[in-house]
Amino acid sequence: GVKDLKIRSHKIDKVVLEFDGYGGITGGSKNKPISNVEVTGMEIIGANADITYKEALDHRLVRSTKYRGRGIAIWAGHNIYIHDMIVHHCPGSGIRINRGDYIVIANNIVYSNTWWNSAAESAIVLAQSVAIDESDKVKMSIVGNEVYDNVNKIPYYNPNYSWDYSPIA
């Protein structure tokens, strides 16, 4: 996977990434994790403002990328630093890292995300974390973020569950 990468804006430029598909910044996989990556100083805008409730509900079972797109999604990696970002109006998570270790998500503004995804996502997600070493120090940190108006407006749907079965009950 990709390693030793910095994605940042120049101090005097305002960089805005707009998307209406899979995501603003994505990377890593279980077989090709990324490492030593920093993302900072940009604004990421998803398609929430251009999607209606009826449209999202009608496409709930299809799970098109238009209704699931995430602002930043890292599917596997370690030593990742995401900071000083503005991430908003993404149908899915604003910032999501799966299978990560040594992660810092700091001083971001994350708002108006998760509206149209039927997978019950959250504004900032650390999921399925993995250890790359035996250290017992703090390795995952979410600190100093401003997070608001991240609401799941579409009912949760998982095609692996029967209509008359609840995994909770």
Image: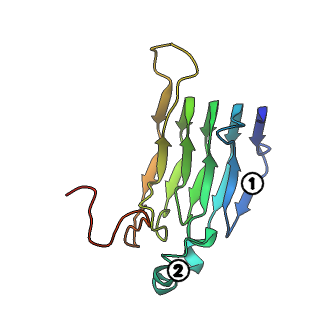
Q: Quadrant of the C terminus?
A: bottom left
Q: Residues within 10 Å of mark 2 (few under 14, many from 20)?
A: some
135 above or below 34? above
Front-most of 87 and 124? 124
32 above or below 167? above
In the displayed structure, does residue 32 sit left or right of residue 130? right
Rendered residue at 53%/37% (across/down): 106
Rendered residue at 62%/72% (across/down): 66
Front-most of 75 and 85? 75
Write down the quadrant of residue 148 in the picture. Answer: bottom left
| Residue type marked 2 | His
Q: Residue 59 carries which label?
A: 2
Camera-side mark, 1 or 2: 2
Mark 2 element type: loop
| Residue type marked 1 | Lys
Q: Please provide percent x and percent y for residue 70.
A: 59, 58
Q: Please provide percent x and percent y for residue 43.
A: 66, 55
Q: Which residue lies furthest to the top in this view?
A: 135
Give the colouring mode of the picture: rainbow
Which residue is under mark 1? 14
Using the numbered discs, state the Cα–Cα distance from disc 1 to disc 2 in whole angstroms.
Answer: 34 Å
